[in-house]
Image (tube, rainbow, N blue to C red):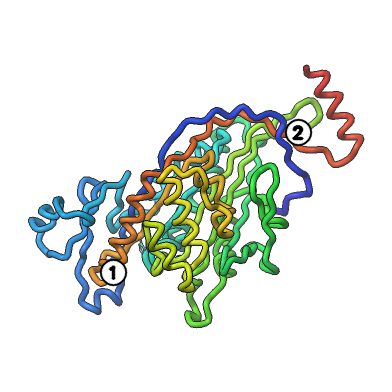
Amino acid sequence: GGIKSGLELKTITENSSTVGSRILVFVRVRPMAKKEKEAGSRNCVRIVNRREVYLTEFASEKDYLRLKRLRGRHFTFDASFPDPTPQQDVYSSTTAELVEGVLQGKNGSVFCYGPTGAGKTYTMLGTMDNPGVMVLAIKDLFAKIRQRSCDGNHVVHLSYLEVYNEMVRDLLSPGRPLVLREDKQGIVAAGLTQYRAYSTDEVMALLQQGNKNRTTEPTRANETSSRSHAILQVVAEYRVRHASMNVVNRVGKLSLIDLAGSERALATDQRTLRSLEGANINRSLLALSSCINALVEGKKHIPYRNSKLTQLLKDSLGGVCNTVMIANISPSNISFGETQNTLHWADRAKEIRTKACQADEEIMLVPETETDQAKLLLELQKDN
Ligand code: ADP
Ligand code: MG
């Protein structure tokens, strides 16, 4: 791998037509933890027909079917994954289609949402033995590129960043916080490492290291912070040779987001959100909830500017993007309230409509020297 050179991208044509599509929402239940078992907890989550989730405090199968009539304890999602569901199945159902889209120049994003300990990082990053969505997506991306005859024309770059305490940090090259800047592509973190990836093998180690760089809270010594959001951005460019110049004629970006723990920040209405604002609760997470509320209600003004996270994700939420949300929950009745809130929030996210992109744009590498620029102009004139 290597770091991307100083080449800048410039859009020359933009004919994207858009169609509305809604956010796909999934739920994944993790296995019962040892601690929960020891505390004598019962399973309070039932999944029926691979889609419906019932929350029950009753033990018998007959009882939970009656709950269908109880409000707030029965939810339907695009798919619900019981324990155990292999990482590969979660990847295939939630993200594989977005990876295909990225190769066609469509942007996509996948969020993991839920309280601390519910399985967000396991789902996104996974372990060496059981790699998660981030790693499987990159593996699949490389496999799909290899299947195409013109694989030499694809270039893949990775960036891995963190939002913690309203500061943006580069997880591949830790150092000072990065400044967010608005340019033609949208909001970008200035100076963020763009790692050129050639194979899957190097990626897991890279991401594990990046994850170790996530900010830890002093009180939770060995744990990555429950208040840090990690964002992996995978950019795939398809380049073709245009006379003697390399022209990028398709770019697709996939954003994979491991959100901060949602505990204490769960609210699905503006009034509750406002009352939480003063209470030292993750500002980016509250801002994300506010944006989702505004998007669901069809508001004209969406308050992206309220936090670093929502600025970074502006093009992934209301913009031209295919979006997937995975809500992670514990099966234990000890977490009943938290789980119910998480499912309620996820249920609301189903209502967001995004503009799915039919990308048809051509982007050109801007030459570094004036002679290149002159040559390029000549080539373009010849072509027309
Ligand atoms: P979060 O990132 O939401 O705080 P983690 O992903 O760190 O939670 O999960 C907490 C613990 O549960 C970890 O030890 C993790 O390995 C384990 N775990 C979570 N989900 C699963 C799963 N689907 N299968 C097996 N273990 C899991
Ligand atoms: Mg985590």
Q: Residue furthest right?
A: 371
Q: Residue furthest left?
A: 62
Which disc number belongs to residue 246? 2
271 or 347: nearer the viewer: 271
The local secondary structure at tag 1 comes to helix
Q: Give the amino acid type for the residue marked by disc 2 in the picture.
A: Asn
Query: Which is closer to the viewer, label 1 or label 2?
Result: 1
Residue 362 in the image: state x and y as whole percent.
67, 30
Residue 184 in the image: state x and y as whole percent.
69, 42
* Rendered view: 29 above or below 248: below
What residue does disc 1 label? 335
Q: Is residue 270 left or right of residue 1?
A: left
**First in sequence: mark 1 or mark 2?**
2
Residues at marks 1 and 2, CA–CA distance in whole angstroms: 54 Å
- Residue positioned 73% across, 37% down in the render: 10
* Rendered view: 68 above or below 162: above
Q: Give the amino acid type for the residue marked by disc 1 in the picture.
A: Ser
